[in-house]
Amino acid sequence: MAKLHKFMLPMLIGIFLLLFAACGGDDEKSSEGYSFKFQYACINRTLLPCELMAEPGGLVDSIKKETNGQVEIEISSFPELGLGGPDTLRLIEDGTLSMGEIYSGYVGGDYPPIDAANLWGLISDNDLNMEIIDAVHEPTVKDLKEKFGAIVIGESYYPNNYFFSGRPLRTVADFEGMKTRSHSTVLADLVNGIGADAQFMAFSEVYTGLERGILDAAVTCGPCAAGLRWFEVTDYMVGPIVALAVTYISVNEDKWNEIPSDLQSIILAETKKHSDKNRALVKETWDKKGIDDNVAGGMEYIEFSPEIKAALKKASMEHVVPNWVERVGGADSDAVQMFNEYVSPLLGISIDANGQAVAK
């Protein structure tokens, strides 16, 4: 009998392990029979990163193809859904949005550190801009998950920004009092700092604002303006303000956790392909395309003079940075610490104990 027990115990353990493996653990979900449809809210359908997602063979098609139709993405936008960009984080957190585009210019009020890499007027060239975006990526993604339940699965990138104006802007004096649409508080500080008058208006309403004279000018990226045909209501494209923007393609954490791991892996792989392609286009193509398209629409392109470049840098150091420090809670805040830890070594500018920008 003792010998029987001796042989039965290992056999029973083996049977148990086989049954456990067949059933699968709680951490591994089978994707068989699974299907899910995301509605992705991008900033605006006319913007190139959104068009890139939706084009034939783009992210929408590739995810559907690689998951054999088990995961589908339906492209929508903030205007179509009646949503405001500043509400993005809260909408993803509470599940109203299952998937959306998080832009620092919109959500800095809810998450101040996100502006650490995008303090307008400080950055001088595109390569440095990308280095700074990369430097803050990991802590930003970590915070978005822990504080807002937003799982970042990829990124979209936007090219540099320009002033679109009804009059030429060749000297600093030309900016004085000019009512200028600004799409973030940080940008508004820069606009006010050079003597213009920053105005806030929904992106979809800017065309009408320019047409009716409610606005004298507006700031956005070249392709963004061309997509909404601002060349019909303005005559001059002036810049660039070096401000490559990254937006985070994010999914509500509860929705993400419903997806089996094999499908998650496919989504992440396809989204990375999209992000890599988008990044290359921003660095190599889209700025020139923005200028060419607007000039073809009848605009005159004016490159910033050295005087204007110097004025923008001064406005950033004296207005953008101190105002941002005050909004985020002072020089000891997490946002300033992020800037000094990740951005300062690359930029050569730090924020001191008084909240002032100091060149190293």
Image (spheres, grey):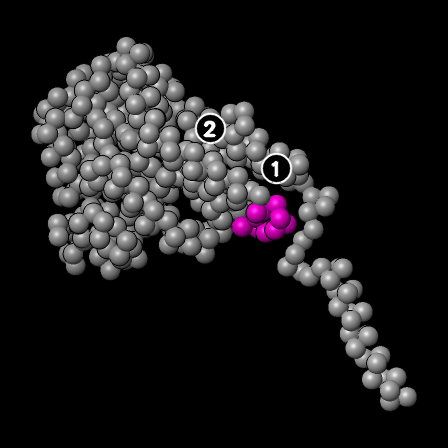
Pointer 2 residue: 52
Q: For this view, does 303 lie left or right of residue 334?
A: left
Which x, y percent locates residue 257?
59, 51
Disc 1: CA contacts within 10 A as few (<14), some (14-19) or many (>=20): some
Q: For this view, does 108 lie left or right of residue 149?
A: left
Q: Which residues are magenta?
A: 253-265
The answer to whether 109 is drawn above or below residue 169 in the figure is below
**Mark 1 residue type:** Glu
The answer to whether 181 is drawn above or below residue 18 in the figure is above
Q: Is residue 43 magenta?
A: no
Pointer 1 residue: 66
Q: Main secondary structure of the magenta part?
A: helix
Residue at (15%, 21%) from the top-left corner?
A: 169
> Can you see residue 10?
yes
Q: For this view, does 60 lie left or right of residue 162?
A: right
Q: What distance separates the C-alpha of mark 2 from that of mark 1?
A: 18 Å
